[in-house]
Amino acid sequence: MPNQLSQQISPYLLQHAENPVDWHPWNAAARELAVREQKLIFLSIGYAACHWCHVMAHESFQDGEIARRLNENFVSIKVDRQERPDLDQLYMEAVQLMTGRGGWPLSVFLTPEGQAFYGGTYWPPRRRHGMAGFDEVLAAVADTWQTHRGEVRQQAQRVTQALRADPWQGAAAELSDEPLRAAETALAQSFDPRRGGFGPAPKFPQPMSLQLLLQRWRRTGEDALLDMVNTTLERMALGGIYDQIGGGFHRYSIDDRWLVPHFEKMLYDNALLAGCYLDAWQATKKPLYERVLRETLDYVLRDLTAVEGGFFSAEDADSEGVEGKFYLWTPAEVAAVLGAEPAATFCNVYDVTATGNFEGRNIPHLPNPLAAVGLPGRDTDELELELHDDRRKLLAARAQRVRPACDDQVLVSWNGLMIDVLARAAAALNEPRWGHAAVKAADFLLQALGDGSGRLRHSWRRGRASGPAFLDDYASLGNALVTLSRQHAEPRWHDEAVRLADVILEQFAAPRAGGFFYTAAESEPLLVRKKDLVDNSAPSGNGLAVTFLLRLAALGGPAHGQIRPADRQIRPAYRQVAVDTFRACMGILRQAPLATGQMLLALNEVL
């Protein structure tokens, strides 16, 4: 029988609607049940495209014995991190404080009042390879609650106090470029000069860091900064992290050479990386960057776009229960599509071999740039045209396979990122269809997720909007509207951006301490109301907010330079709020420059 998730709209929650675990959504009724029965809460947070979430669901949450233990001893609550990023931020920080690491699935044990005291990520169902089994963890936690309840509450209180510590505390400081220079140094020290990227495997693309290096190169003219960007973007574009057949980027590479990706595709990754390739192309005019940009945006329009105009969140890593299966090839499969001779050329260029480079099959990639392949008697331009046609044929053949599942939630913050880059790329490369897609998506968000007074909902799926919007929703969409206002002589984009900025100042600002809270003042109160300064896979809420306010303050007005009387009043105010935010967080920017890239991008524009 379906549990209490069956009426939810989140695809992740619906994936668990028929588990034998008596899952509850996060709501007052579930939390009141825990208090009334004095049961611990088991909080499980993940998302629809998460590979290890699928693994733990299959191994543990469909296991009858584990479900019995959960149902007898806990109130089990399932949360979609994309639907409730505020809860994910709060309890992820708690687990990181307790264990020093985090990730998804996030598995947290809470007191009946919602305070975290123990947690982790993935556990196998039974002890394996020295790792405790989830069955052992459940038994130990339940026993500890029965026999050492006071100690559990003390631990929970310590964690809560640590969560409430305000990293913003301290006197406001004057703005300086010290954090920017520190970020340059740290990135140079961790840079891989051979393969690009920063740090060892697994390698993440780090688009905010790449954009910061580009900005600093424009300001300083130091070639070493641009070299780091070029090496990284080129190696990623040639690697398996980039879908050579269909365009678009996978989440990250598990090796240090960008070959074997974690195969899920996220909307925010593709928006942010498309922005990197756009800006790098404008700086260098490298044809490779233009091709990757075009293919990535076309992938989003082809596979991640709703009929209504919004953009879906992600595509799964798995298909038919196997990670990456949709994207892998053998020489025989390539030959069946292309014919023997073209297939031999394609396999030579893209390193598709009988041995394979991933579990006996192949992730197409280019070990070397095409100009360096050196096929005898082949002109590089002619070869590129042939390979372009080959990729088109292989894409059509791949479309007949069982596709990975699509997380068809439309999230305002991630959509704002994509609208911004589509609009900028449309203007830079004279591609009206990208501009049309940006306008259609912006109209959709304002109509389907807005209430006409500037308030937004956070997510939409299949005709239903849900949840109040968060800081990054307002700031990301606002920033996209500023871009549209710059490109279209329509006052509505400017006016909508002003409305969103006013909500940010009214609902999210922390005027005494500086900066912005992640949740609105009128939203559900949580254990701790957090400020979102540190970038994760997407830019921080505060970083997006100051970027938006600065760009809005610099905007001439709704009619390209015509400033209305009201605009003369608001423009200085927006800029001052952004500057005050920088002054309040200079200490954090100095301490953690690599974790605050979006803030540093905005700071670089102010100095």
Image (cartoon, grey):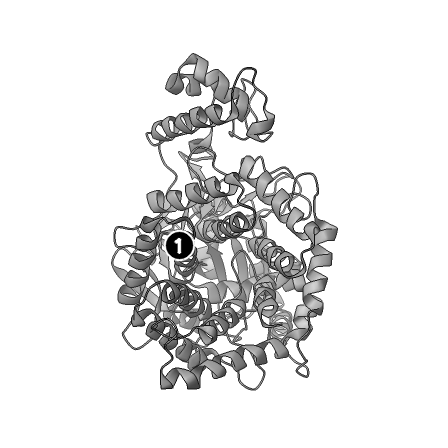
- Image quadrant where one finds the C terminus: bottom right
Residue 505 location in percent, x, y?
Answer: 45, 80
Question: Is residue 303 shown left or right of residue 49?
Answer: left
Residue 509 location in percent, x, y?
Answer: 49, 80
- Report the front residue among 66 and 572: 572
One can see residue 8 in this view: no
One can see residue 163 in this view: yes
Question: Is residue 495 shown left or right of residue 270?
Answer: left
Q: State the residue at coordinates (65%, 58%).
A: 99
Residue 481 location in percent, x, y?
Answer: 38, 66
Outermost residue toward the front? Answer: 561
Outermost residue toward the top? Answer: 340
Relative to 528, say whether 481 is above or below.
above
Give the SS element for disc 1.
Answer: helix
Question: Is residue 588 shown left or right of residue 475?
Answer: right
- How many marks can you see? 1
Q: Which residue is mark 1?
A: 427
Question: Is residue 401 shown left or right of residue 577?
Answer: left
Q: State the residue at coordinates (52%, 52%).
A: 279
Name the image quarter holding residue 217. bottom right
- Report the front residue among 139 and 557: 557
What is the crowding at mark 1: few (fewer than 14 residues within 10 Å), some, or many (at least 20)? some
Residue 163 location in percent, x, y?
Answer: 60, 72
Q: State the residue at coordinates (30%, 67%).
A: 446
Kind of residue at disc 1 = Ala
Relative to 106, say whether 453 is above or below.
below
- Report the front residue among 579 and 74: 579
